[in-house]
Amino acid sequence: MKCLKCGSFNSEAAVYCQSCATYLAEKPGIEYFEIFKALILALLSSAVFYLIFPMPVTRSEYLIQLFSGRISELIFTLTLWSLFLIFFKFIRHRQQQRAYTSFRDHELHESLSEGIYVRDVEKRIIEISQFLEAKKVKKFQNSVIFRRIRRILYYLRAVPKKEEINTILNYQAEIDHNRMQTGYTLINVFIWAIPILGFIGTVFGIGQSIGEFSQFIRGVETSELSTQMRSALSGVTQGLSVAFNTTFLALVGVIPVMLLSSTLRKGEEDLLLSVEEYCLEDLLPNLHVRPGEETMDEAVHEHLGKLVEFSENWRKQVAPVMSELEKQSESLKHQVGGLQPLLRHYSDHVFQVKDRVEEQRNTAEAKEDVEEEQNASDIASVKSESTDEKPDDAESGEETSLKEETPSPTLEENDGNPEPVSENTESREQEKLKASGD
């Protein structure tokens, strides 16, 4: 591709000139060049049609009458010119569609989804161009989607705000749509001009027939009326034939032009809508325009990489220990499984011993209760007997007086312990029993 600034030639896949680093684009008059090429092809095709084949060799009087005449030749040439223009526009549309399909590729989509930063604008543009070159997309520099994405990335570097970029994207969509509409201006003129030429041929043929008939009226002679009538009618019918044939040829020729141009225009409008959806759904969400976001992302990626590396090394170091622990746990599991019957037998024996000890303790407590009850009954009987008897001699009286003078220990002297009181009482009762026995 030729650089418009320095004139040096570059490869077809180059985005920037290798000499002056200027963005490579097609010449502004490329559409006029295609119009000129379509005109040359239409003239050559018309010349072949009328001079070589099939008009010189055909024997059909109807075809000869249909395509003969300057107006019919002009209608035929304009129809071919329109069809060649539509053909060149279809080729450009196929290139645009292929470029859009390449942008929808999974590999490029994954690359762009990683994020587009301000500092990587040039790098991303070169990466996209290399990818399209690998996909063998011709003249992708002038494709709608590449041109729009390139401008958005440059605006990202100049205006790092998504709201402004979204507004610029809408303006660019309007520009592309207007460019597409202006590309059909000449075809629309031909769609309007071809039927008009047919109507002009109709008027011309009718006028020609009326002129022939009026000439017959002015020069008619009664002696040769029949011969002159035949010649006049021949001229009238020939003019009417030109009138209707041109109209028919114009209407038949404009139909394929209208159908093909409408279909191609619908395809280009759908492509523009698809490009807008791609920019809104896949491009804008991946633009990183916030201040400090790049540094933060880099730090996060760096720390994540270090963390992954550390975890991998730690896993390699811990793997032998974990395998050894797994083996030890298996052996311990088997040992515990072997000890379970012994532990169960030991626990059963412990519970049996506990039950025996509790039974013996309960038995001892019951015996003690019985003995205490028996002692209490004996003491009560002794007390009852002692109260009924009187002292027989003086010694018993003296002992009794001594016992009365001796103070009995109280709960306070024994610090609230009632046991000494009961022991003294039992000793006095025993002494009384001895004295009564004496």
Image: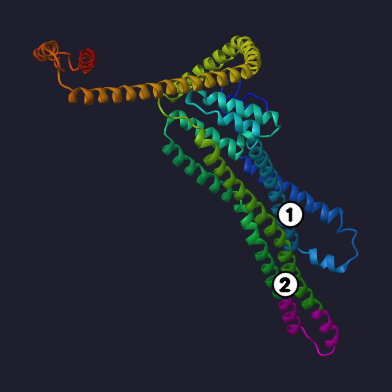
Q: What predominant SS class does the magenta segment belong to? A: helix
- Image quadrant assignment for residue 337: top right
The answer to whether the residue labelled 2 contacts the one labelled 1, judged by CB atoms less than 8 Å apart, is no
Q: Secondary structure at mark 1?
A: helix
Identified by mark 2, the residue type is Gly
- Give the image's coloring scheme: rainbow
Q: Nearer the viewer, mark 2 or mark 1?
A: 1
Residue that appears at 71% across and 64% down: 250
Q: Is residue 235 above or below residue 122?
A: below
User: How many residues crowd around disc 2 within 10 Å: few (fewer than 14), some, or many (20 or more)?
Assistant: many
Nearest to the observer: residue 396 or residue 122: 396
The boundaries of the magenta stretch are 209-233
> Circle 2 is placed at which residue position?
205
Which residue is farthest front?
A: 392
Residue that appears at 21% across and 18% down: 418
Q: Secondary structure at mark 2?
A: helix
Nearest to the observer: residue 104 or residue 147: 104
> Circle 1 is placed at which residue position?
80
Nearest to the observer: residue 310 or residue 156: 310
Alpha carbon separation for disc pair 2 and 1: 24 Å
Give the quadrant of the N terminus.
top right
Q: Is residue 1 visible?
A: no
Give the quadrant of the C terminus.
top left
Identified by mark 1, the residue type is Leu
Q: Position of residue 412 (x, y in %)?
A: 14, 16
